[in-house]
């Protein structure tokens, strides 16, 4: 899962060191527009739908939080 | 704020958009980001085409073309315009009010009440409220509501987050007093603690425009803009739409024993295709119920998007196919948000002109 997420993030921001960050937004690796692109990529890659109220800085902060978001969306309990 | 005004009707809606169509594909080179990245973003955000007015054309100029068309086609008698509300963030001047400019241009009666409302994406709902309150309090028969913006001139063309979304437009709505008419049932909210989420920092009394405020500077995302340009805290604005606005819509409807699925048409402010897509999911409605073709085809014209959505949804429909239950909802700058139940049956006119 983490490698897939890394690939997906690097396709959006190739030069960012996502593996070394625990807060992608705070560290400036992705911005609000990138978050939208990450959402689309997650939905395409994992076949989930991310509700709008789950597109939050906390859920897009790290590989762990993204993996947890995908897991919750897969289970139909995104919030 | 809640208000219900009986004995009114929306008599007609006209949209005016500049003829020039700007395509995102043609704009990619003016943004600082990699073209492939921009194209992926366009797919997600629904960036396609938007309308951009020629330099020097103002919102009042577009509105004038609409008013002239209505007068020429016999839908509006200048002598019968008892109020003129101009909702926009792009007035012709700081002083005087643009409603008075339009008043003078068309020779409306001296008894016509004129007022400008400086508001954006919730502005149409506020304009409906002002018009309805005016008609109810004075007993007048007809009010004209102009709503729209020519914001393309106030957004940096190097700002990929905002410029592709914006479309210039003006709209004209005529509201009439009519005994037995469906009336207007609306609510409006404000949270001024978010006034800096969408703003043009310079050009007012707080920070007058100067050569310094016109200087472009790149933000961390590669977008270049000046203090004279619109700046949006995109993350916060998006969260606002998906929490505050989404909950408000559900509660507004629940207070009227309705749910989204009961509505034939949800005419939401056309903020962006992505925002509307997520609201559609939350509200569990279809694209036919909650369309997004205005922002995709014409762009976001702030207070103009709801009447533009009315025109896009109803233009050319036979009377028998006009939706019965419709709701309008605006949200954005302020922050402010509001909604109204509207009856769109029996409009005298509903059209779009592209002069």
Image: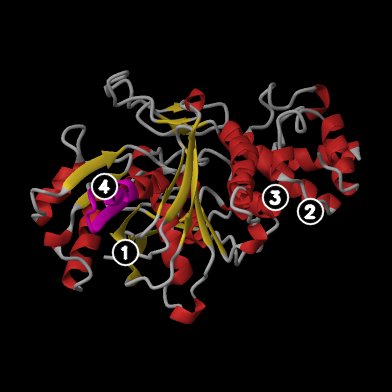
- Cβ atoms under marks 4 and 3 closer than 8 Å: no
Q: Nearer the viewer, mark 4 or mark 1?
A: 1
| Label 2 and label 1 in one chain | no
Q: Callout 4: 10 Å neighbours few (<14), some, many (20+)?
A: many
Q: Which residue is mark 3?
A: B282
Question: How far is mark 2 from mark 3, CA to CA?
Answer: 19 Å
Q: Is the C-beta separation of discs 4 and 2 under 8 Å?
A: no
Q: Secondary structure at mark 3?
A: helix
Q: According to the image, label 1 marks what residue? A: B178
The residue located at (63%, 32%) in the rendering is A31
Instruction: Say whether marks 2 and 3 touch (CB < 8 Å).
Output: no
Query: To which chain does the residue with label 3 belong?
Result: B
Q: Is residue B191 left or right of residue B97?
A: right
Look at mark 4 in the image and give the residue it sits on.
B85
Determine if marks 4 and 1 fall on one subunit.
yes
Quadrant that contains the C terminus of chain B: bottom left
């Amino acid at each position: 899962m983490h490698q897939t997420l890394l690939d997906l993030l690097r396709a959006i921001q190739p030069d960012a060191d996502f593996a070394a960050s625990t807060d992608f937004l705070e560290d400036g690796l992705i911005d609000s527009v990138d978050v939208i692109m990450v959402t689309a990529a997650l939905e395409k890659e994992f076949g989930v739908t991310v509700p709008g109220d789950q597109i939050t800085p906390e859920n897009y902060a790290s590989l762990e939080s993204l993996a947890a978001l995908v897991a919750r969306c897969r289970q139909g309990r995104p919030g | 704020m809640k208000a219900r005004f009986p004995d009114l009707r929306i008599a007609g809606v006209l949209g005016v958009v500049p003829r020039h169509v700007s395509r995102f594909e043609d704009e990619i080179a003016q943004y600082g980001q990699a073209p492939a990245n921009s194209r992926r973003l366009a797919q997600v955000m629904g960036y396609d085409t938007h309308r951009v007015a020629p330099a020097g054309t103002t919102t009042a100029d577009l509105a004038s073309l609409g008013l002239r068309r209505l007068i020429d086609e016999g839908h509006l008698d200048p002598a019968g315009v008892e109020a003129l509300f101009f909702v926009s963030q792009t007035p012709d001047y700081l002083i005087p009010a643009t409603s008075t400019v339009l008043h003078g241009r068309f020779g409306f009666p001296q008894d016509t009440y004129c007022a400008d409302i400086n508001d954006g994406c919730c502005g149409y709902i506020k304009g409906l409220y002002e018009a309805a309150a005016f008609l109810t309090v004075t007993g007048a028969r007809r009010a004209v509501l102009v709503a729209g913006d020519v914001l393309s001139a106030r957004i940096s063309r190097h700002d990929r987050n905002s410029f592709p979304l914006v479309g210039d437009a003006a709209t004209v709505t005529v509201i009439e007093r009519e005994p037995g008419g469906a009336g207007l049932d609306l609510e409006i909210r404000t949270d001024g603690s978010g006034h800096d989420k969408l703003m043009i920092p310079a050009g007012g009394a707080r920070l007058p425009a100067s050569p310094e405020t016109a200087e472009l500077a790149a933000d961390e995302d590669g977008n270049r803009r000046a203090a004279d340009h619109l700046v949006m805290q995109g993350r916060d604005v998006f969260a606002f739409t998906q929490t505050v606005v989404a909950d408000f819509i559900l509660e507004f409807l629940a207070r009227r024993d309705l749910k989204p699925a009961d509505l034939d048409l949800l005419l939401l402010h056309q903020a962006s295709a992505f925002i509307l897509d997520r609201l559609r999911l939350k509200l569990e409605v279809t694209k036919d119920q909650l369309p997004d073709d205005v922002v995709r085809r014409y762009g976001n014209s702030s207070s103009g998007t709801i009447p533009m959505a009315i025109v896009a949804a109803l233009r050319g429909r036979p009377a028998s196919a006009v939706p019965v239950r419709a709701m309008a909802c605006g949200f954005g700058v302020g922050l402010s948000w509001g909604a109204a139940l509207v009856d769109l049956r029996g409009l005298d006119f509903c059209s779009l002109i592209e002069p």
